Image (cartoon, helix red, strand yellow):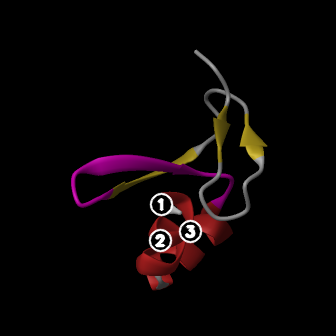
Amino acid sequence: MADKTCLVCTKVIAEGKEMKWNHEGKWLVFDDMGCRNRFIGNPKKYLEATAS
């Protein structure tokens, strides 16, 4: 599988090294726990950024 990109910091994450989080039925990946926690604190901010 291809590497993934963190939704918060946009860092490329090697397969198997990602921090996963299920948001509204969709699995998202993050570089680390800090990025995951920033997303949880304000998911709308990051989801809107990826939509544009």
| Residue plotted at (61% across, 42% down) | 18
Q: Which residue is mark 1?
A: 51
Residue placed furthest toward the bottom? 41
Cα–Cα span, label 2 and label 3: 4 Å
In percent of width and height, residue 48 lies at 47, 71
| Residue 38: mark in rendering | none
Assess disc 2: are there few (<14), some (14-19) or many (≥20) residues with their C-alpha within 10 Å of its C-alpha: few
Magenta extent: 23-32
Residue contact between numbered discs 3 and 1, judged by CB atoms under 8 Å: yes
> Does 14 sit left or right of 16 as displayed?
right
Cα–Cα span, label 2 and label 1: 5 Å
Cα–Cα span, label 3 and label 1: 6 Å
Give the quadrant of residue 5: top right
Assess disc 3: are there few (<14), some (14-19) or many (≥20) residues with their C-alpha within 10 Å of its C-alpha: few
Q: Which residue is mark 2?
A: 48
Residue contact between numbered discs 2 and 3, judged by CB atoms under 8 Å: yes
Q: Which residue is mark 3?
A: 49
